[in-house]
Image (tube, rainbow, N blue to C red):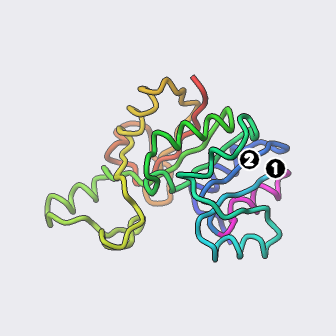
Amino acid sequence: MALRPDLAIIAAAVPARARALDIGCGDGELIAALRDKGVDARGLEIDPSNVTAAIARGQSVVQGDANRDLIDYPADGFDYAILSQTLQTTERPDRVVGELLRIAPRAFVSFPNFAHWRVRLALLWNGRMPVTRLLPVAWYETPNIHHVTVSDFRQLIADKGIRVERAWYLSGDKPTSDAAASWRAEHAIFLISRG
């Protein structure tokens, strides 16, 4: 089975023999891909059924909440911290980003861009929160508690003095350019590091 496009980008960018922590790892799909290329990959996941599925695959995954449990990881315990499609579900994204860069010098952060043109059009046309392929549930069912945009994330990391090493943007499942990413990208992936 092919990896989700954002996970494939992350898997390709993490070098062999690195140590990586996948926060919000789901059933361990990315961990499996990283291990196949020789990465010491581990996971933290809040959903007990996903933890069970990952452990059944032979992966090192513990149940925990990124909002509270990242503090238990040692500083520089990993080379990479990964937070894929989880930032918008955290209570304080700014603090979680700080914890990512405390436990690893580099971090991947990916999220759906709530300023994508289809989202904007749905709000303008219907006056309601949209339901899309990447945001497939109604506003009252969604785990998303923060509606982050590419521009919002760029501002957060600039305010914190965090460096962007690389960014990827996806429209559908295909890469798109940085030009006008704030409204053209459905999904953003950032590789960030300490400033």
Q: Is residue 34 left or right of residue 50?
A: right
Residue at image position (77%, 71%) is 55
Magenta stretch: give its range: 27-38
Between label 2 and label 1, give the one nearer the viewer.
Answer: 2
Q: Position of residue 128 (x, y in %)?
A: 19, 66
Instruction: Determine whether label 2 and label 1 are within 8 Å by CB.
Output: yes
Task: Locate residue 64 relative to residue 110 in the image: left or right.
Answer: right
* Figure quadrant of the C terminus: top right
In-front residue for pair 86/191? 86
Task: Identify the residue shown where x is 69% and y is 37%.
Answer: 104
Q: Where in the figure is residue 94, as x and y percent of width and height?
A: 46, 39
> Is residue 26 rendered magenta in the image?
no
Residue 20 versus residue 127 in the image, above or below: above
Secondary structure, mark 1, is loop
Which circle's residue, 2 or 1, is located before the other in the chain?
2
Q: Secondary structure at mark 2?
A: strand
Amino acid type at image mark 1: Val
Task: Using the image as rendered, state which of residue 129 and residue 189 is in the foreground.
Answer: 129
Residue 148 picture location, percent across and down: 37, 48
On the image, numbered disc 2 is attached to which residue?
20
**Residue type of the residue flagged with mark 2:** Ala
Q: Which residue is mark 1?
A: 39
Residue at position x 70%, y 45% from top?
Answer: 73
Question: Relative to 138, does residue 175 appear above or below in the rendering?
Answer: above
Around disc 1, counting alpha carbons within 10 Å, would you say few (fewer than 14), some (14 to 19), or many (20 or more)?
some
Q: Residue at x 60, y 27 (%)?
A: 194
